[in-house]
Image (spheres, grey):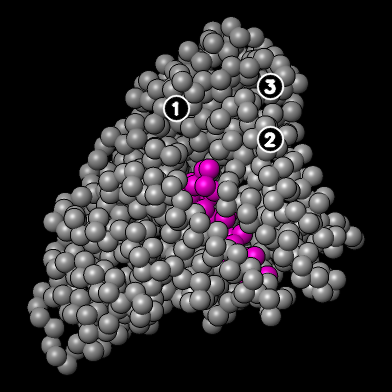
Amino acid sequence: MKTFSRNIKLNDYNRILLSDTAPFDVPIIFSNNSFYKKIEVLENKSAFLRSTFDYLFTPRKLDKYTIPMRYKIRKSDFNYRHMGLLHPSSQLMILEFYKSFSHQIIHYCSQSTYSIRRPKKVASFFFVRNAIENNHNLRTGAAESVSDENKYRHATSYFSYDRYTRLYQFFESEEYLNLETKYTDFWSLDISKCFESIYTHSIEWATKSKFISKDFNVKDSFGAIFDKLMQKSNYNETNGIIIGNEFSRIFAEVILQAVDRKTLEMLEKIGIRENEDYDIRRYVDDYFIFANSGDTAQKVTNILEDNLRQYKLHLNSNKTKKLTKPFITKITKSKIETSKAIDELYNILFSYEDKKIKINPKRIRRNHHVIKSFLNRIKAACSDDIDSYNVMTGYVLSAFLNNVKKITDSITDENRSNFSSSKNAFVIILRIAFHLFSVNPSNSNSIKLSSLMYLSFVFFEKNFKEEDETIKLLINSFIKDFFSSGKCKQLLDNSYNYFSIEFANLLFVSRNMGTDFLLTPKQIDQIFDLDAIESKNTSFAKEEENSDYFRLMAFLYYVGDEQEYNRLKERAVKLINQRLSNLSAITKDAKLSYLALDSIACPYIDEKVRTKWACRLFKEVFGKEIPLSDKSSFFKAISEEEWFISWKHPELWNLLEKKELHFDY
């Protein structure tokens, strides 16, 4: 598939907000896109908006903390990863930090020969996959220029990275093959709870030189400022850093580069030479040791452990894997067999002509047999290791998604004339995809399945307009089956204060299929569980880990203006109103800031109610009641454009596309 590049304005520091300051694992409809656009044109906006923006977000000295919104995403059936969404003002502080210290970041991330994922330079261009670019034309109602839209559609990182942006790229590289040829032993090591364990002051231990920034008006070292920024954006915490954003990964990278450097020095002192006796490759917090013997690998590990301990970090012995030639893991074996199963399935469904993919016209009489056979192949491939099955779910979903993109990019007249074959191919792919998602409903898998769903129904809208309802009914039935399944109910009921972003993503896509394919009010009530939010009315302000904001915004996006959900929506609006009764903490509490701004901008809430909330915001910003003459203009200034939630349904593909392009490590 062809790629091409587009230039980036190097002085556009605001694009940091599009890639480095917010977590990847958020609902599809959440992004910093509109926040970025607001900043770009803020000087041309009303005085009301400028003053409000200044009060809420303008970066000031590093003497006040903000409280991130903590939430959970699913790691496995009963385990979660604890994420953090920074207050917008803290994100703008990071932006200012990048302005002043980009070169120092690059400097301190270039000290280690071990690291294979590190910032190398400020990115000057980005790559666009041609098929994705064409897929965007399938269905969009966005009224914006191509140049502006691409600026935030495809910006994936402020820095360009050396050498791999995804771990699998290393294991499929010639470099890995050469290391396997050269060495007899391979050890895989993992730092236990790396980000939760990092002591922020240790950034100063890792950075000895002093780079002074006049812009920050602080006479201190790069490390000290970095440390303070991490603390102040995380409720003054010194133990542990926020999980989820690229900025935190860079913070960890600087520290681990110092560990790498010290390890190299100590090994040289005892006569263990890099490139001769051993080699290390580190990807974020995963270490891979290649050595001439198990004894050498053990010595390398011992010294690495000693140096990690100096930074209060430790290896997870339960995740250590030791291999001798050939370096083949159970996951590698599973992947080889899974690839064969995918190829065989594609031979049934597709053919290739002049490098273009075609859907085979031959009728498949028993879809169920094809589906069952494929799933049995995957189970057999993973029979020796249950963890492999979870990994293979993502691998298969990625393969399916890539293939569907090729189909939508190279549809032929022959395929357009053969609805039955097209339907069969998509039915089989979607049925398998939903099954695999039910096995491992992770956030990354939900993005893949959501994209697959979206491309599928839009493909039929475009090429089989008279029959597009068939595929929508199919997707709708899969969604209903999933949400009524015992597995889904078990996962939804499994944890206090947890809202499934993974499941909400599927609903966002199904909402875009049209009002004929909506779930019933009873089903929606069970999924969004407004009772759970109501039970926490008094604790909202006190809880750091609280996903009410995501839950309420996702609910409003789904129900929209549909009258059948009015009773539920009235309850949701009441819950929002209770949470916005006191806005005194809005400049420091991230969840309150996001909830207030996106609720005021929500087009599905009655304007009178939103105006009341805007008046509360005015009083907080300006310290007085709003004059009657200013009420309308202030409300318009705050609400006429989106903040963080994209309420426009046609924008969903842009947001999905960005998720795919963003390299989630």
Question: For the residue labelled by badge 1, is the local secondary structure a helix, a strand or a loop?
Answer: loop
In the picture shown, does residue 16 fall above or below 322?
Answer: below
Looking at the image, is mark 1 or mark 3 nearer the viewer?
Answer: 3
Between disc 2 and disc 3, whose residue precedes?
3
Q: Residue at x 54, y 79 (%)?
A: 142
Tag 2 residue: 335
Amino acid type, callout 1? Ile
Amino acid type, callout 2? Lys
Residue 446 belongs to the span the image colors magenta? yes
Principal secondary structure, stretch drawn in magenta? helix
Looking at the image, is mark 2 or mark 1 nearer the viewer?
Answer: 2
**Counting other residues with Cα less than 10 Å from the Cα at mark 3, is it few (<14), some (14-19), or many (20 or more)?**
some
Residue 65, x across and y down, in percent: 22, 51
Query: In this orientation, which residue lies closer to the viewer: 363 or 246?
Result: 363
Q: What is the span of residues highlighted in magenta in the rendered image?
A: 437-459
Between disc 1 and disc 3, whose residue precedes?
1
Residue 144, x across and y down, in percent: 54, 80
Question: For the residue labelled by badge 3, is the local secondary structure a helix, a strand or a loop?
Answer: loop
Query: In this orientation, which residue lies closer to the viewer: 123 or 570?
Result: 570
Tag 1 residue: 191
Position of residue 552 in the picture relative to residue 3 (left or right): left
Q: Residue at x 43, y 47 (%)?
A: 486
Tag 3 residue: 327
The answer to whether one can see residue 490 in this image is: yes
Residue 27, x across and y down, in percent: 43, 59
Q: Residue at x 74, y 28 (%)?
A: 177
Amino acid type, callout 3? Phe
